[in-house]
Amino acid sequence: MGIASRIVTATDAEDVVQEAWLRWNSTDRTIVRSTPAFLSRTTARLSITMTRTAYARYQTAAGLQPGDAVRAATDPAELVENAEQLLTAMAVLVTRLDKREQVAFILREAFDLPYRNIGELLGLSEPNARQLIRRARVRLVDGRGRQAPPVERFRLFAAFLDAAHQGDLAPLAELARKN
């Protein structure tokens, strides 16, 4: 449990330990030189695999992927569907990230801005911007969130749409400075 809980969440750690135990039970023990080494390595590898597959599930579950080309929708139903997907993505950002992380993540992933430019917009150095975005990615994968009022999601959504349509990223960056 100790190895698994250092790599995955507590509930996932229990699943990993159960899977490791099942593998141990189905293993020919005559070829195992060290039982603790076998169980430790199996647990660590299963934990890492679970983390990777959780990240892959997260990437495909959101519907909109960073770097996906947004094509112009002409069908009203498609416009509504795209807006709903964007609102869902904004809800995930608002519940899992603080405002600076939200804006930095959007600037990097949606607008493909270099870290230097993100740092300038947010009043950070390039290494700090890089660290902020790395921390945002980790928190998105982590899955823990907080309750956030719907107005925060719509405020971020509106700023994102304005930045996408007008090309002015300053109002979006201003969101990071507001309390």
Image (tube, grey):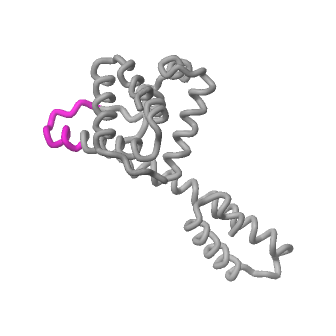
User: At 45% from the left edge and 46% from the top edge, which residue is drawn?
Assistant: 96
Residue 15 shows in the view? yes
Query: Does residue 17 appear left or right of residue 164 in this picture?
Result: right
Q: As displayed, is residue 90 above or below residue 34?
A: above
User: At 71% from the left edge and 66% from the top edge, which residue is drawn?
Assistant: 2
On the image, the x and y values in percent for residue 136 come to 52, 39
Q: As displayed, is residue 33 above or below residue 70?
A: below
| Count of residue discs | 0
Query: Does residue 49 appear left or right of residue 160 in this picture?
Result: right
User: At 24% from the left edge and 39% from the top edge, which residue is drawn?
Assistant: 83
Q: Residue furthest right?
A: 33
Q: Quadrant of residue 102?
A: top left
On the image, the x and y values in percent for residue 38 come to 77, 70
Q: Residue furthest left?
A: 76
On the image, the x and y values in percent for residue 168 come to 35, 17
Residue 110 shows in the view? no
User: At 33% from the left edge and 18% from the top edge, which residue is drawn?
Assistant: 167
* The residue stretch that appears in magenta: 71-81
Q: Nearer the viewer, residue 125 or 110?
A: 125
On the image, the x and y values in percent for residue 133 come to 54, 34
Q: As displayed, is residue 53 above or below residue 69?
A: below
Query: Does residue 77 appear left or right of residue 59 in this picture?
Result: left
Quadrant location of the C terminus? top left
Is 64 one of the magenta-colored residues? Answer: no
Q: Nearer the viewer, residue 47 or 144?
A: 144
Is 75 one of the magenta-colored residues? Answer: yes
Quadrant location of the N terminus? bottom right
